[in-house]
Amino acid sequence: MSNQERHPDEVVCAEGASVPGVEVIGPREVPLGGPRAMLVRRTLPSRERSLIGAWCFVDHYGPDLVSDSGGMVVAAHPHTGLATVSWLFTGEIEHRDSAGNVAMVRPGEVNLMTAGHGISHSEVSTPETTTLHGAQLWVALPADARDVAPGFEHYAPPPRTGPGWTARVFLGSLLGDASPVRTHTELLGAELLLEAGAEIVVDVAEGFEHGVLLDQGAIQVDGTGLAAGELGYLAPGCATITLAAQRDSRLLLLGGPPFGESIIMWWNFVGRSHEEIVEFRERWQEQITRDGEVVDSGLEVGGGRFGQVPGQPLPPIPAPPMPNARLRERR
């Protein structure tokens, strides 16, 4: 998904201080697009925390009626230095990218797109979709992998069940299951459904920090309550996480070892300096603009830094103007 804010904030991401217990991060609503803007609830990055492992961006949306919101119509846009992770609860979205991948995003199936050196892609909900509900997640790539060739993986994790719970592990390993999806840092990503009154003690990696995003319902995370839309953060050092549901609940459990690098996020780019972000933006604008109008770049699939999305008639999204202030370099 593109960050379609007209004036995206500069975000300097770095490890936050560890806090005891569960730190609760509330969402903020962000409109994407124009007058019929699709609203998302963003919990990462936030003022309290900008990274959980390599997870650097968490948008949570829906359930939205397509008849009201217009659905998801995100034309071609660029990414660098990150991987996108798409996870749906309801609906269907067509993904197309400049590496030639065409795939559907469906509930219970993960799409991981590694941007690396550069990629462009589009996301459009299908005509049959009446309700959209899901999460769009970004993962920062470490220094030794942020310039890799773009890639794409799709995986439908089988459900694992226990007393009052169902889990699907789409990245990493949990509850005796492991995802085959390859990542450039250690990651955990799983969906858990809990019936009202159910409790599960989950064994987790002690070296990971974890985030629990509650989609719906009401749960206790190690005794701390989470309401729908909130993100609970747990610092490294936990060997188990106890999840107890007061109502039927659905959540995403994310995790990874502390990233150990500072990054700058602006619009759809992850870089390390002001100069890099400026260059990424200029390379994209060179591909799509002529005399100030958005046009077909004329590039072949994979051409230029970001390439062209084949079979996508929507004009690509131009980059917003750079802010007046210099983006702060990593410290």
Image (spheres, rainbow, N blue to C red):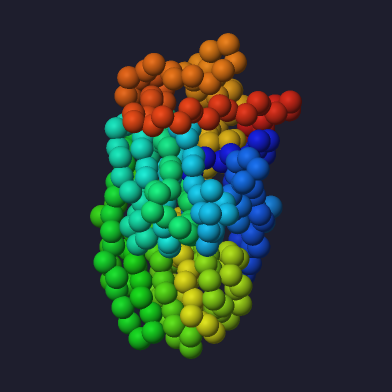
Q: Position of residue 59 (x, y in %)?
A: 54, 53
Q: Is residue 238 above or below residue 195?
A: above
| Farthest residue, direction bottom | 197
Q: Position of residue 87 (x, y in %)?
A: 41, 56
Q: Is residue 304 above or below residue 7?
A: above
Q: Residue at x 66, y 30 (%)?
A: 327
Quarter of the image with the C terminus in it:
top right
Q: Nearer the viewer, residue 281 or 36?
A: 36
Q: Position of residue 48 (x, y in %)?
A: 67, 56
Q: Is residue 21 visible?
A: no
Q: Is residue 173 visible?
A: yes
Numbered disc total: 0
| Farthest residue, direction top | 291
Q: Residue at x 58, y 11 (%)?
A: 291
Q: Position of residue 26 (x, y in %)?
A: 66, 62
User: Which quadrant of the figure has residue 162?
Assistant: bottom left
Q: Residue at x 58, y 28 (%)?
A: 319
User: Which quadrant of the figure has residue 43?
Assistant: bottom right
Q: Is residue 244 above or below residue 48?
A: below
Q: Residue at x 38, y 54 (%)?
A: 128
In the picture, measured across the screen, residue 67 lies left or right of residue 27, that is left
